[in-house]
Amino acid sequence: MKKPVLIDDNSPTGVIDICIVTCNRLEYLKRCIWSIIASTSVKYRILVIDDASTDGTKGWLKTMNDRGLVHKIILNEKKIGAARNFNAIIGESESQWFVMANDDMYFYRWWEYACFYIVNRYPKCGIVSFYDYTRLNLDKGNKVVEQGIMKVDRTGLGASFVFRDSFDAVGGFYLPEGKIMGFFTTSFCAAFKKAKVLKNEIYSATTNYAHHMDLPKSKLSEREFLKQYNDQRNSDKY
């Protein structure tokens, strides 16, 4: 696999905030965050909100924050659900482009370059989804625009590169009062496409620069995980 090349000098600059929502999935979260640390070559900050976990997540996040590896943490005392969690942690971001990620996403090397390439190539792009939509039966409006890139009508947003002004134009995610769970991303994508902003199109990097992980089958130490990750990322087999 060759490293993606930026096509011009208009790539996003400054720090990219990576906003993660987690709840009672510490082993997922560890792998997610260590994959970001091991693979990301641009300036970034990791921001995490924990939705009242009871599995040791809070203590681990405090340690990572003390070590300067996680920039900001929010620790909820009561569950508020995914939609409100994303609104809260994205609200702490100060970057023009940010990443929103579930705790079970595993970032491969060069993920950020794939995003830069797409937003440079398609000026109306306001969201780059990391999901591989070539394997899913979605709306007929989705179409491949070039090798490895698909323009899509909607995305799960579980790992996505998002333009701040376009996100703010929609007003974030919404669930009816009293509900904390629900598939809120479909309505968001519909509103996003109708937003009166320049960047209101959604593209998918169909090459897997990040993916949904399987259940962890073993508890690896940080050193063991980083060795495993680096062995994999240097093998050029993905």
Image: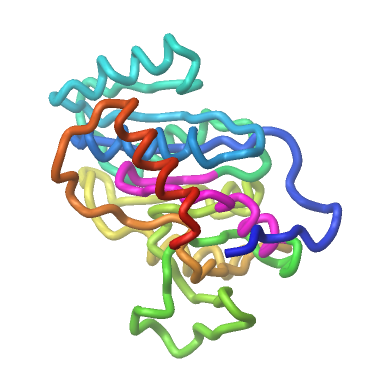
Q: Is residue 141 above or below residue 20?
A: below
Query: In the figure, is residue 24 to the left or right of 110?
Result: left
Q: Quadrant of residue 119?
A: bottom right
Colouring style: rainbow
- Image coordinates for residue 72, horizontal then vertical, percent: 47, 21
* Quadrant in the rendering for residue 212: bottom left
State the image coordinates of residue 5 (x, y, percent, origin top left).
Answer: 73, 60
Pick the quarter of the image with the N terminus. bottom right
Residue 196 visible, this orientation: no
The answer to whether residue 237 of the structure is visible from this angle is: yes
Q: Residue at 28% of width from left, 23% of height from top?
A: 76
Q: Residue at coordinates 38% horizontally, 57% vertically from top-left?
A: 211
Is 156 placed above or below 78 here?
below
Q: Is residue 145 above or below residue 29?
A: below
In reply to whether residue 118 is colored magenta, the answer given is yes
Measured as percent of width and height from the top left, residue 105 is found at 36, 49
Q: Nearer the viewer, residue 87 or 105?
A: 105
Taking the view exactly as shown, the residue that stands out farthest to the bottom is 140
Q: Is residue 116 above or below residue 99?
A: below
Residue extending furthest toward the right: 9
| The one of 47 and 124 positioned closer to us in this rendering | 47
- Extreme top residue here? 66
Queried whether the magenta region covers residue 113, the answer comes back as yes
The count of marks equals 0
What quarter of the picture does the C terminus occupy?
bottom left
**Residue range of the region highlighted in magenta in the rendering:** 99-119
Residue at 32% from the left image edge and 42% from the top image edge:
103
Q: Nearer the viewer, residue 166 or 98?
A: 98
